[in-house]
Amino acid sequence: MLGSPINRKQKGGAVASTTPRPETERKRNEILRAAMETFGAKGSTNGTLADIAEQVGMTHAGVLHHFGSKRALLLEVLEHRDQDDVAHLHGQHMPGGAALFMHLVGTALRNNLRPGIVQVYTVLSAEAVTDGHPARTFFEERYRSLRTEIEAAFRELCASENVGDPDTIDQAAASILAVMDGLQLQWLLDPKAIELAAATEFAIQAIVNAVLRPGPPLSSYVREP
């Protein structure tokens, strides 16, 4: 949903070419695709550079030549995933207000067509909760940034609907991200059981409505025997 170009001289020590050539970029993209498949299937711990090198017909040293380290490759896979989320915006800024919520639904719709990208993100985000994982900082910053974006969209939407700034916005922002990631996990496990875009839209709509027009508390539905 959010992405920014990676600085290869700062991320894991990989060396950026001063004169990138088409053949170099083609090989890098091949390695990235192989890394996404490997990390998605095996995780970043069990998935090795040797596995990735074998898929693209290179040596372990050849992969290191392009990315410098496994950590750098892992982070660039994640950056590539984020850039793919916003590629359809053609350089425009992320939308705000109600348009951001529709962008999230659109992301779920696009994800339905790219299970490999969803799989590697789901696997790596789960792994990142462990101590010392190379992607932990990436995901901490990513979720912090996304919550900020969604909270701002809520405030803009509330203002346009003449609703006071409710104190539930932070909970709503975190809940939207949790629902999207949870639905992706269920969809990966059983694609036929989950309509990813429809379920995502239902959940986001319910959360947005709960902020704008709160209903009765859950406890009110409990009936004493």
Image (cartoon, grey):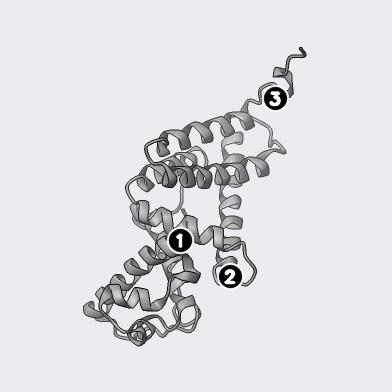
Q: Nearer the viewer, residue 70 or 217?
A: 70
- Residue at 56% from the left image edge and 36% from the top image edge: 157
- Residue at 42% from the left image edge and 36% from the top image edge: 194
Q: Is the C-beta separation of discs 3 and 1 under 8 Å? A: no
Kind of element beneath mark 2 = loop
Q: Residues within 10 Å of mark 2 (few under 14, many from 20)?
A: some
Q: Is the C-beta separation of discs 1 and 2 under 8 Å? A: no
Label for residue 3? Answer: 1
Q: Provide the residue designation for mark 3.
A: 218
Q: Nearer the viewer, residue 218 or 97?
A: 218
Q: Is residue 106 positioned above or below 54 on the image?
A: above
Q: Provide the residue designation for mark 2.
A: 133
Image coords of residue 149 (percent x, y): 56, 50
Q: Earlier in the sequence, mark 3 or mark 2?
A: 2
Q: Look at discs 3 and 1 and give the one toward the viewer.
A: 3
Image coords of residue 4 (percent x, y): 45, 65
9 sits to left or right of 134: left
- How many numbered marks, from 0 up? 3
Q: Earlier in the sequence, mark 3 or mark 1?
A: 1
Kind of element beneath mark 3 = helix
Between marks 1 and 2, how big is the CA–CA gap? 20 Å
Q: Is the C-beta separation of discs 3 and 2 under 8 Å? A: no
Image coords of residue 26 (percent x, y): 25, 74
**Residue 92 is at least partly visible in this image:** no
**Residue 57 is at least partly visible in this image:** yes
